[in-house]
Image (cartoon, helix red, strand yellow):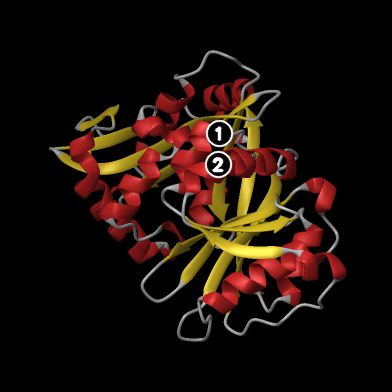
C-alpha cells in the first residue's frame, strides 16, 4: 500500500468527504451510490451501525480515499459482521481496500464469526476480491421496480383487515419488532431488534400496518424520495401468512403514493424467498438488477489473507 495512506476510525466531520467519495465511486459503479448528507446521517443512526463506531476510513494527504462500513448484527443465536468497502476510483489497485479489510478483521477475536458482504453481479473488481478470499455466495438481493401496480385478488382475510398509515410510530414499535423478528429469523441478513431499537428505525420511515380484530398482522416501511419511493421492509406475522394480507398491504401503499413510470417504487428481495418474489411479481414488480451476498468465517478470511496477500 502507498506509504502516504493512513487508516483511522470514522469521524463525524468526515460526512461531506464520505458523500464526495460515494459520488466519485458511483460515477464508475452506479450501484454504489450516490449518497446525500441526510441519507448518510440516517444510515449512521441505524442501531446496528452505532454511529459508525466500527467504520474505518483511508486518508491520503488529508483527503478521504477509502471507506469501510462495518456493523456487528445480533442475529439471535449468533452475531454476523457486515462489511462494505468503497475506494475512490483513482486510488484503486493500491491495496487500500485490502488495508481497510485488515482493519475490520482486526476488530473481532472470534475466528468463527461470520463475515458478510454484498457485491453487485456486474462489478468485476468486487467479484474478484471476494473470490480471492474464498467468500461463498449464499444468496442474492434482487432489486425490483414497479411502475404499474396490479391489484391482487381479494381474499376473505384481506377483506377483513384494516390497512392504515401510523402516525404514532412509538406506539406500534413493539409489535413491529415482534413481527420482524419472527418473519425474518431465517434470512441471511436478519437483524434482531428490540422495541427501543425498532422505535428508532421507525422514526425515519413511513409506517403502514395491517390489523385484524384490533391486532397487528403485518407492516410495511417505506422511504420517500423526490421522484420515487422504496419499500424498505414488509412482513406479515408467520401465523397469519398465506392469506393475502401481504399483497393487499403492499398494494394499498403503492396506490396511496400513485406509483407510475414517473414515480416508481423499488424494493430488494432475497433470491431465496420464492413466495415473496411471486407476490411482488403479481403486484407488478419486475427484476432490474442483482446484488450477491457472500459469507465466510473470519478465521478462513484471515487464513486466505495470509496465503494470497503477503
Specify the quadrant that holds the N terminus.
Answer: top left
What residue does disc 1 label?
Answer: 195
Q: Is residue 153 left or right of residue 227?
A: right
In the rendered image, residue 86, in percent from the top left (x then y), is placed at 38, 47
What residue does disc 2 label?
Answer: 173
Mark-to-mark CA distance, 1 and 2: 6 Å
Q: Which residue lies furthest to the top in this view?
A: 109
- Label 2 crowd (10 A; few <14 / some 14-19 / many >=20): many
Residue at (44, 32) in percent of width and height: 101
Under circle 1, the secondary element is helix
In the rendered image, residue 297, in percent from the top left (x then y), is placed at 65, 26
Residue 146 appears in which quarter of the rendering?
A: bottom right
Residue 77 appears in which quarter of the rendering?
A: top right
Label drawn at residue 29: none
In the rendered image, residue 186, in percent from the top left (x then y), is placed at 75, 39
Residue closer to the observer: 263 or 92:
263
Amino acid at each position: 500500500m502507498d506509504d502516504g495512506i493512513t487508516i483511522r476510525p470514522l469521524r463525524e466531520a468526515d460526512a461531506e468527504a464520505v458523500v464526495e467519495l460515494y459520488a466519485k465511486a458511483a460515477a464508475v459503479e452506479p450501484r454504489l451510490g450516490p449518497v446525500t448528507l441526510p441519507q448518510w446521517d440516517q444510515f449512521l443512526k441505524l442501531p446496528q451501525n452505532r454511529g459508525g463506531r466500527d467504520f474505518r476510513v483511508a486518508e491520503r494527504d488529508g483527503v478521504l480515499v477509502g471507506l469501510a462500513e462495518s456493523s456487528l448484527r445480533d442475529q439471535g443465536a449468533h452475531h454476523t459482521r457486515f462489511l462494505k468497502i468503497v475506494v475512490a476510483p483513482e486510488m484503486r489497485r493500491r491495496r487500500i481496500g485490502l488495508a481497510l479489510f485488515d482493519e475490520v478483521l482486526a476488530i473481532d477475536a472470534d475466528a468463527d464469526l461470520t463475515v458478510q458482504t454484498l457485491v453487485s453481479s456486474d462489478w468485476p473488481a468486487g467479484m474478484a476480491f471476494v473470490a480471492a478470499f474464498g467468500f461463498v455466495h449464499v444468496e442474492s438481493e434482487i432489486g425490483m421496480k414497479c411502475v404499474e401496480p396490479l391489484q391482487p385478488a381479494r381474499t376473505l382475510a384481506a377483506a377483513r383487515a384494516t390497512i392504515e398509515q401510523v402516525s404514532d410510530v412509538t406506539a406500534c414499535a413493539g409489535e413491529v419488532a415482534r413481527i420482524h423478528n419472527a418473519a425474518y429469523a431465517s434470512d441471511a441478513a436478519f437483524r434482531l431488534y428490540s422495541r427501543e431499537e425498532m422505535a428508532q428505525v421507525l422514526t425515519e420511515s413511513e409506517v403502514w400496518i395491517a390489523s385484524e380484530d384490533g391486532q397487528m398482522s403485518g407492516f410495511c416501511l417505506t422511504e420517500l424520495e423526490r421522484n420515487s419511493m422504496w419499500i424498505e421492509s414488509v412482513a406479515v406475522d408467520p401465523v397469519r401468512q398465506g392469506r393475502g394480507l401481504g399483497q393487499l398491504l403492499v398494494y394499498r401503499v403503492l396506490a396511496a403514493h400513485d406509483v407510475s413510470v414517473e414515480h416508481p417504487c423499488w424494493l430488494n428481495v432475497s433470491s431465496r424467498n420464492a413466495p415473496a418474489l411471486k407476490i411482488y411479481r403479481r403486484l407488478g414488480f419486475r427484476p432490474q438488477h442483482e446484488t450477491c451476498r457472500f459469507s465466510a468465517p473470519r478465521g478462513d478470511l484471515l487464513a486466505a489473507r495470509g496465503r494470497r496477500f503477503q
